[in-house]
């Protein structure tokens, strides 16, 4: 009884719960759309990002087909943008090919199966039946995949069009090297060996490196503009025989990218390295002597003369290799010395640079006597207490007489500016600009012509290092010491290379070939013209002979006429042959001479 009562109540509670849940579902209100408004009640829609190649524009949202018109238009100068579009098209082409394969399989699944050849069916009958079945399958497949194939064709044409835009943006580089067959890397990708032309240079920052075993690596980084062409003639230099850990990176060392202090530090590095290589050479020579194959003693049956000859060859070969080591050492030392010269040249370039001071407010200008004939004032300008630009200048300043009459000599009101070279004297840890090159005087925007010279400042003359500084400053100011244009290439060349370069400045083989070839072309050309003139003259003689024929029955006259006619005819043939040969020879000479401009 109790069980029945509880079971009845539980059933009622369950039915009530289900009824309440159903009511809640149907009574729930839907989410209403709300128009976004700003603080002023104005519409505030958020716009989609407007990039040049957004997925909305290209049509990759919600599986929409690509918008080929927008995709394949030539509307950007960005190589990366075209690459992105090509990748999109390639993905679509791959997907389309898969769709076509699926459709082909589906079409084939709906085709009635081809019955195999029966026992009583001729082969010709089976072939006809199979050909009909194959044609039916082909027609159905063509019909079912027509739209897909057309879309695939459109995608491939769009891709080809964009690839054409991109191909026009490739740059090119022509790289040659001494020695040849050096590996070439473009952004760490090997593109072959020198010499070569590479026509797929992607626009942007590009690093090109040339490397060959046994030689120093060459590299450069530059901005490759679309369609630009670059040419590099690279000369690689043999690595030294010395230890790699202490090896100097000449290319990095000789970059023109530092201050005077840094260049001086580099000179100290080179000088220290020069002291090391002598000891290293002796060690290398000792190692060579220990590794050089020993001479076998005199063999049984070997005569003393043969043994001495073998020993002489052995000794000469050893000395030859020792001489090579010494030569490489000398070349390396020369490079170190030249590197010091290059760094000093960089320093001279910096120090000889002319700088302009600000207006020297504390300068005092005192005018002296006036020369009316030359229209000049004697004057002294000075500011010897200035710690940055102390100076004393004595000379003449050109002032017109009308201006000079009204000028206050005690306070002439000149504005003073100084020009000096970038070579300060260091006094008490301060850079003092004493190397003055020019004084400028102006007043109310008018510049006055100044002539004269600077005096030395007494308080600096007795300081340590002033004499050496003064000697170099005078050399820089006079131009005796100036930038000579030395660089990395100068430092790396040895004496043999320099002499070869000097010899090449004369008449090399190319020049001689051109002289002979073009001279021969002129000579044979003149010969061809003369022969052509002879041909025309003989043809005129033949025409005249045709007009004046002998009388009929005049046997002697006919014989003479025939001899004259045949002689002229043979002369024409002979001269035409010579003319043609001379012409061919002239063309050949010109071709040979022209080839030397390309090799």
Image (spheres, grey):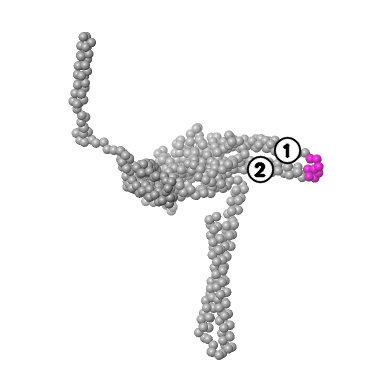
Residue at the farthest top position: 2
**Contact between labelled residues 1 and 2, with CB atoms less than 8 Å apart:** no
Q: Up-down: is 568 above or below 194?
A: below
- Image quadrant holding the N terminus, namely top left
Name the residue at the front extreme.
Answer: 120
Of tags 2 and 1, which is closer to the observer?
1
Magenta stretch secondary structure, dominant: loop
Q: Quadrant of residue 44?
A: top left
Q: Which residues are magenta?
A: 298-307
Q: Is residue 10 left or right of residue 257?
A: left
SS type, badge 1 = loop
Q: Residue 171: in sight, yes or no?
A: yes
- Is 398 inside the magenta-drawn segment? no
In front of the other: 432 or 14? 14
Q: Which residue is mark 2?
A: 324
Q: Residues within 10 Å of mark 1 (few under 14, many from 20)?
A: few
Q: Name the residue nearer the viewer: 26 or 197.
A: 26
Give residue 294's mark.
1
Question: Can residue 483 be seen?
Answer: no
Q: Please report the residue visible at 53 percent of the width from the left and 57 percent of the height from the top.
A: 597
Question: What is the x, y in percent for residue 134?
Answer: 39, 48
Assess whether residue 303 is covered by the magenta stretch. Answer: yes
Name the residue at 58% across, 46% down.
493
Crowd rating for badge 2 (residues with CA inside 10 Å; few <14, some 14–19, many 20+): few
Q: Secondary structure at mark 2?
A: helix
Q: What is the distance, in whole Å, between disc 2 and disc 1 at their CAs?
A: 19 Å
The single residue placed furthest to the bottom in the displayed view is 553
């Amino acid at each position: 009884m109790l069980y029945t009562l509880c079971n009845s109540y539980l059933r009622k509670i369950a039915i009530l719960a289900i009824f309440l849940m159903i009511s809640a579902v149907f009574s729930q209100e839907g989410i209403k759309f709300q128009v976004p408004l700003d603080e002023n009640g104005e519409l505030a829609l958020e716009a989609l990002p407007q990039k040049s190649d957004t997925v909305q524009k290209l049509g990759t949202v919600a599986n929409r087909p690509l918008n080929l018109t927008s995709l394949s238009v030539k509307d950007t100068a960005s190589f990366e943008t075209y690459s992105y579009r090509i990748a999109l098209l390639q993905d679509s082409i791959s997907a389309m090919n898969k769709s076509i394969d699926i459709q082909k399989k589906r079409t084939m699944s709906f085709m009635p199966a081809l019955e195999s050849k029966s026992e009583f069916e001729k082969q010709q009958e089976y072939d006809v039946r199979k050909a009909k079945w194959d044609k039916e399958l082909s027609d159905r497949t063509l019909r079912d995949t027509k739209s897909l194939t057309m879309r695939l064709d459109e995608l491939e044409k769009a891709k080809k069009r964009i690839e054409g835009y991109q191909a026009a943006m490739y740059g090119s580089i022509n790289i040659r090297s001494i020695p040849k067959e050096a590996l070439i890397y473009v952004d760490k990708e090997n593109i072959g060996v020198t010499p070569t032309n590479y026509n797929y240079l992607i626009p942007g920052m590009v690093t090109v490196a040339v490397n060959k075993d046994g030689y120093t690596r060459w590299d450069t980084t530059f901005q490759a503009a679309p369609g630009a062409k670059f040419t590099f003639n690279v000369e690689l230099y043999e690595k030294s025989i010395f230890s790699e850990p202490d090896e100097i990176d000449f290319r990095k060392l000789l970059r023109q990218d530092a201050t005077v202090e840094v260049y001086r530090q580099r000179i100290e590095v080179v000088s220290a390295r020069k002291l090391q290589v002598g000891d290293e050479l002796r060690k290398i020579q000792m190692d060579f002597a220990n590794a050089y194959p020993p001479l076998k003693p005199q063999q049984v049956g070997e005569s003393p003369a043969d043994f001495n000859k073998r020993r002489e060859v052995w000794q000469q070969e050893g000395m030859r290799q020792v001489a090579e080591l010494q030569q490489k050492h000398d070349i390396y030392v020369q490079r170190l010395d030249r590197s010091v010269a290059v760094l000093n040249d960089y320093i001279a370039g910096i120090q000889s640079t002319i700088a302009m001071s600000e207006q020297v407010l504390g300068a005092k200008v005192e005018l002296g006597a006036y020369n009316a004939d030359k229209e000049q004032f004697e004057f002294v300008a000075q500011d010897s207490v200035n710690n940055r630009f102390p100076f004393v200048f004595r000379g003449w300043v050109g002032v017109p007489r009308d201006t000079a009459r009204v000028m206050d000599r005690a306070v002439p009101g000149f504005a003073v500016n100084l020009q000096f070279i970038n070579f300060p004297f260091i006094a008490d840890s301060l850079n003092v600009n004493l190397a003055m090159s020019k004084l400028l005087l102006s007043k109310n925007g008018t510049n006055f012509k100044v002539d004269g010279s600077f005096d030395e400042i007494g308080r600096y003359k007795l300081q340590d290092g002033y004499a050496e500084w003064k000697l170099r400053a005078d050399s820089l100011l006079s131009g005796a010491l100036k930038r000579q244009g030395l660089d990395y290439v100068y430092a790396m060349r040895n004496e043999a290379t320099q002499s070869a370069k000097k010899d090449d400045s004369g008449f090399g083989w190319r020049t001689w070939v051109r002289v002979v070839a073009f001279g021969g072309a002129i000579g044979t050309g003149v010969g061809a013209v003369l022969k052509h003139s002879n041909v025309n003259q003989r043809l005129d003689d033949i025409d005249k002979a045709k007009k004046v024929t002998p009388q009929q029955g005049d046997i002697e006259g006919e014989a003479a006429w025939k001899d004259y006619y045949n002689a002229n005819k043979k002369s024409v043939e002979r001269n035409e042959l010579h003319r043609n040969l001379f012409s061919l020879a002239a063309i050949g000479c010109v071709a040979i001479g022209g080839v030397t401009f390309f090799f």
